[in-house]
Image: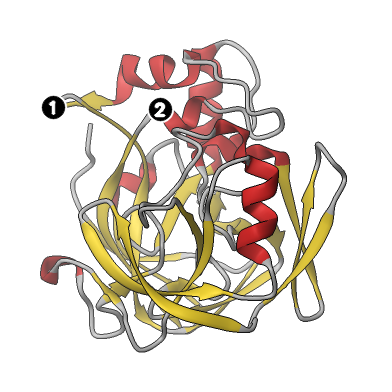
Amino acid sequence: MSSILVKQLYIFPIKSLAAIAVNEVTVDAAGFVGDRRFMLVDSEGKFITQRTRPDLTRFRLSQVSDGYSVQDLITGETKVLSAQPQLKEVLTAELWEDSLQVIEVGEGWSAWFSDLLQEPVRLVKKQQNSPRLIKESYQTQGSNQSSFADSLPILLASAASYEQVEAVFGQSYDPLRFRANLIVSGCDAFEEDTFAEVAINAVQLFGAKPCARCQLVNVEPATGQVDRGILKALASFRQKDNKVYFGQQMVPISLGKIRVGDEVLVIKRKDALF
């Protein structure tokens, strides 16, 4: 039997903007370090995503020595976001049902995004001393919190699951539509549904719940074009109780580093979703 291996790792530094592929990540209580620690909010403090602004795909990110380079593909403008930028005042932000204390990023970032998006927005950062607590039933000895992810800190999916969706969809698509952090190889399609606990080196992850998907998977990451075919294809064989599922949401139990090529050991399993 082949080993399950880490195939790809992704961080999304700014919620709902582009991914960065990495070869190694550090896992802390809020997930992958550098993942969804920044977020755009509107003038009322409500979070902004590609659900209502698919044109957020216009921004490409890449790693630089002290943070992330953000490029606007439309104007060609580029600005470097430090991982530890200058900060301004504390704000209250709304992320789904959560009301969070966040802090606005300085260095002209809010004005930069507002000008390009032609909408008053602010770039905010997660505060270390103001964690976003998750439900008690999902908490572990290593984590009681999440990042600015929609729900839990880490999303795991298998390469075989992407391939099965592609077979049903009938054409190739960009896997980044599903915005997973951790993609594994060497297991069957949707076998990740059964991952109750996995170990990768010193890192242990709790398989808290399957990930219910929304229309955001219909947004093509390269262009911002919306094609409802992906969600329709997935719903044809992965729908249950009016929800459509892809991927397993994970919560850290123990912290450390994960690298591409690492072996994934399934410590505990649970019943398959379908």
Q: Residue at the location (85% across, 51% down)?
A: 77
- Dot 1 corresponds to which residue? 241
- With 38 as the anchor, is 189 left or right in this view? left
Eyeballing the image, is 247 above or below 169?
below
Q: Which numbered disc, 1 or 2, marks the residue that appears first in the sequence? A: 2
**Between residues 81 and 140, which one lies in front from this camera angle?**
81
Q: Secondary structure at mark 1?
A: loop
Mark 1: few/some/many CA within 10 Å (<14, 14-19, 20+): few
Whether residue 74 is situated above or below residue 112 in the rendered picture:
above
Looking at the rendered structure, the secondary structure element under dot 2 is: helix
In the picture, measured across the screen, residue 142 lies left or right of residue 17, that is: left
Q: What is the quadrant of residue 198 in the picture?
A: bottom left
Kind of residue at badge 2: Gln
Q: Residue at x 55, y 20 (%)?
A: 226
Residue at 55 percent of width and 51 percent of height: 183
- Residue 193 pos. (x, y %): 31, 45
Nearest the eye: 204 or 223: 223
Is residue 19 shown to the viewer in this render? no
Badge number at residue 267:
none
Quadrant into which the C terminus falls: top left
- Cα separation, mark 1 vs mark 2, equals 17 Å
Q: Relative to residue 170, is residue 182 depicted above or below?
A: below
Classify 10 Å Cα crowding around label 2: few (below 14), some (14-19), many (20 and above). some
Residue of label 2? 215
Q: Position of residue 184 (x, y in %)?
A: 54, 52
Q: Nearer the viewer, mark 1 or mark 2?
A: 2
Viewer can see residue 242: yes
